[in-house]
């Protein structure tokens, strides 16, 4: 009796199931990567907007006053929004930014950029949908705008 060469139906189905599982895992990994890339884009965009406001003050020769609104997730100049965070992204006060001189009210933070490159000292945190926390510091004398990863919330 000769044995038939080839694969059985069970073997073919098993291979198809394994390919399907592998493909679904790859899709999930790519989706997570795209989400992290989107978060990184908004973190970078926030820092770029702060630098743009400082440069506008230096190049224009006049102070630029902006307000960061914690409740609405916006940075605005003269009530005109220059940065608006998407849903599920939030600005939060940093522990150091609680001083009375930097706050307009409990849900807003004054950001003042001067023509000589200095600025009003301020700190705040951005929280992303996955819980990534990025803290931003605006240094008074040097005019430096720095940001660093704080932690991910559970």
Image: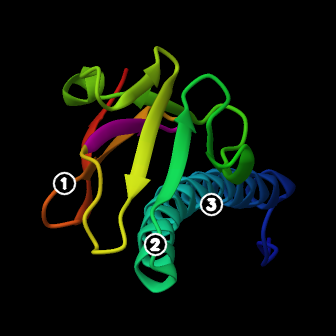
Left/right placement of residue 152 relative to residue 72 reads: left
Which residue lies under the disc numbered 3? 34
The correct choice, above or below, for 104 with respect to 106 in the image is: below
Which residue lies under the disc numbered 2? 57
| Residue occupying the point 68% across, 48% down | 78
Q: Earlier in the sequence, mark 3 or mark 1?
A: 3
Q: Earlier in the sequence, mark 2 or mark 1?
A: 2
Q: Which mark is residue 52?
A: none
Residue 89 located within the stretch drawn in magenta? no
* 3D distance between C-alphas at marks 3 and 1: 36 Å
The nearer-to-camera label among 3 and 2 is 2
| Residue occupying the point 50% across, 67% down | 53
Quadrant hosting residue 34: bottom right
Magenta residues, dominant SS class: strand
Colouring chosen for the image of the structure: rainbow
**Element type where label 2 sits in the image:** helix
Residue furthest bottom as drawn: 59
**Dot 1: few (<14), some (14–19), or many (≥20) neighbours within 10 Å?**
some
| Residue occupying the point 47% across, 25% down | 104
* 3D distance between C-alphas at marks 3 and 2: 35 Å
Which residue lies under the disc numbered 1? 140
**Element type where label 1 sits in the image:** loop
Can residue 16 be seen from the camera position used here? yes
Quadrant showing the N terminus: bottom right
Quadrant showing the C terminus: top left
**Element type where label 3 sits in the image:** helix
Where is residue 9 drawn, in percent x and y?
Answer: 86, 56
| Residue occupying the point 44% across, 38% down | 110
Where is residue 128 drawn, in percent x and y?
Answer: 51, 38
Q: Which residues are magenta?
A: 122-128
Left/right placement of residue 112 relative to residue 11 reads: left
């Amino acid at each position: 009796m000769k044995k038939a060469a080839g694969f059985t139906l069970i073997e073919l189905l098993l291979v198809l199931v394994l390919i399907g599982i592998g493909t679904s895992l790859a899709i999930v990994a790519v989706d997570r990567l795209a989400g992290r890339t989107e978060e990184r884009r908004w973190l970078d965009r926030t820092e770029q907007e702060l630098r743009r406001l400082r440069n506008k003050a230096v190049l224009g020769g006049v102070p630029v006053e902006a307000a960061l609104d914690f409740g609405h997730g916006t940075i605005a100049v003269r009530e005109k929004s220059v940065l608006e965070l998407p849903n599920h992204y939030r600005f939060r006060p940093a522990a150091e930014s609680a001083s009375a001189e930097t706050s307009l009210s409990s849900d807003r933070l004054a950001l003042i950029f001067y023509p000589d490159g200095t600025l009003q000292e301020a700190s705040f945190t951005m929280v992303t949908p996955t819980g990534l926390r990025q803290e931003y510091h605006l240094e008074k004398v040097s005019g430096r705008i720095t940001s660093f990863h704080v932690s991910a919330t559970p």
